[in-house]
Image (spheres, rainbow, N blue to C red):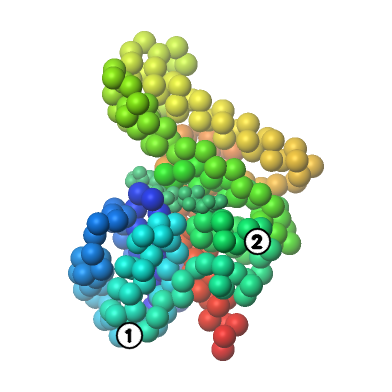
Amino acid sequence: MQIIVDIGNTDAVFGLYNQTHWQHIWRTPARHDESAESYEARLRLWLLEANVPLSSVQLTVLSSVVPTLTPTMRSMLGELFGFEPIVVGPGIYPLLPLEILRPHEIGADLVANALAAYTRYQRNCVVVDFGTALTFTTVSGEGKIIGVAIAPGLKTAIRSLFANTAQLPEVPIEVPESALGTSTTHAIQAGVVLGYEGLVRSLLDRIRAELDGDCLAVATGGLSGRIPSLRDAFTDIVPSLTLDGVRLIGETVTESTK
Ligand SMILES: Nc1ncnc2c1ncn2[C@@H]1O[C@H](COP(=O)(O)OP(=O)(O)OP(=O)(O)O)[C@@H](O)[C@H]1O
Ligand SMILES: CC(C)(CO)[C@@H](O)C(=O)NCCC(=O)O
Ligand SMILES: [K+]
């Protein structure tokens, strides 16, 4: 068994991988003020509920884009299982079959997305991750990370309107029937949700044009299913893609240090 951890800006996701598949995926808010003990208690409870003894976990891999949480989670995993986790970062990138621009700058989750897409398709592919940020990571069929685009995520955009105005409420992410909103809620949904549909299509078109047309698109991230009208823009929607990539990074590092 393996425990794969992906700390994002909203949630920390813990995956329990059993040789061939994800047996469980647990999610908890990624809070800076939460202690190692409290994450440990949560993970112990999940494993207990899943009937998984600690001793059956042979490998742990940690990806984090929240630097203040990385040492907390790293020491928690080390102490709980009695061996150090593999931590995704520039120190291990030379072991991966990827060419990575600015290894100290790129987010570990984007590298994971790129490796998962490269492993799955071995073709030019853009991974669109609908998380706190909306990211477009393009990896070539040869494993080169060609470029990234970063926009505010859907929920982030809706929250920022709410946070920066006196009269706009926080609205649910739902596709409105019309671009002509007839209430404040519908107006925000028209602007953000319909607007994002256009943002995604337009960036995919532009990325494809820059690559002479040859590029698959795959979606992942917590909000990837929230704009159903975008379904046709993607070859696949793979909710576990980032975790898959983190797991593949762990596998590659383990293989290369044998
Ligand atoms: N299964 C789910 N059902 C409903 N909402 C979800 C689900 N998974 C994620 N979300 C929501 O989707 C949003 C984005 O989640 P996601 O995990 O992709 O981003 P994140 O934790 O911020 O990671 P990152 O910072 O890497 O984008 C969060 O607001 C989360 O609460
Ligand atoms: C863009 C996010 C926030 C997406 O989770 C993360 O990958 C990150 O913090 N990246 C660092 C900047 C970069 O990737 O260039
Ligand atoms: K994510």
Name which residue type carries label 1. Gly
- Residue 33 shows in the view: yes
Name which residue type carries label 2. Ile
The local secondary structure at tag 2 comes to loop
1 or 2: tag closer to the N-terminus: 1
The local secondary structure at tag 1 comes to loop
The reply, left or right, for residue 2 in relation to residue 33 is: right
Q: In this view, does 236 lie above or below 181?
A: below
Estimate how packed mark 2 is, as few (under 14), some (14 to 19) or many (20 or more) residues with alpha carbons within 10 Å.
many
Q: In this view, does 12 lie above or below 203?
A: below
Calculate the distance from the C-alpha at mark 1 to the C-alpha at mark 2.
31 Å
**Residue 110 appears at what percent x and percent y?**
54, 55
Residue in view at x 53 percent, y 35 percent? 230
The reply, left or right, for residue 220 in relation to residue 42 is: right
Residue 63 image label:
none
User: The N terminus appears in which quarter of the rendering?
Assistant: bottom left
* Foreground of the two, 102 or 188: 102
- Residue 42 shows in the view: no
> Which residue lies under the disc numbered 2?
100
- Whether the residue under disc 2 has CB within 8 Å of ligand 2: no
Q: Which residue is most to the right?
A: 212
**Residue 25 appears at what percent x and percent y?**
35, 61
Estimate how packed mark 1 is, as few (under 14), some (14 to 19) or many (20 or more) residues with alpha carbons within 10 Å.
few
**Residue 178 appears at what percent x and percent y?**
45, 16
Residue in view at x 42 percent, y 32 percent? 157
The reply, left or right, for residue 78 in relation to residue 220 is: left
Residue in view at x 29 percent, y 56 percent? 32
> Which residue lies under the disc numbered 1?
82
Q: Is residue 80 above or below residue 26?
A: below
Residue in view at x 37 percent, y 31 percent? 160
